[in-house]
Image: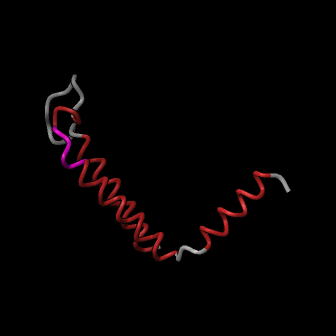
Amino acid sequence: MTLLHWIGNFLRHQLDLVPLSTARWLMIGLYLIVMFWIIQLPSTETNPPDRPGTWRGDLKIWAWFAIMFQIVIYSVF
């Protein structure tokens, strides 16, 4: 067995000890933190420079919806 096999087996064993519900809630928490960070971004950073500042052009809204969709998937499955 090589060193990489030993490291891989060690990591696999350690990650098997983490319950799936804990991993799910950690991922949902991470997505919520990213959603909060996205909302805090100024609109000047999230609007394309060549388009007028309409609500459809603000990338914050679409990123927020995409992450919300991922949270729903993690919550359901």
Farthest residue to the right: give it.
Answer: 1
> Image check: 28 left or right of 57?
right
Q: Name the residue located 21 percent from the left edge and 24 percent from the top edge.
A: 49
Most foreground residue, 33 or 52: 33
Q: Position of residue 73 (x, y in %)?
A: 42, 66
> Image check: 56 left or right of 16?
left
Q: How is the structure coloured here? A: secondary structure
Q: Position of residue 30 (x, y in %)?
A: 36, 59
The magenta region covers 38-42
Q: Position of residue 35 (x, y in %)?
A: 28, 54
Quadrant in the rendering for residue 26:
bottom left
Q: Position of residue 39 (x, y in %)?
A: 20, 49
Most foreground residue, 39 or 51: 39
| 15 falls in the magenta region | no
> Image check: 38 left or right of 24?
left
Main secondary-structure element of the magenta-colored stretch: helix
Q: Can you say whether 59 is above or below 37 in the image?
A: above
Q: Can you say whether 53 is above or below 40 in the image?
A: above
Most foreground residue, 49 or 17: 17
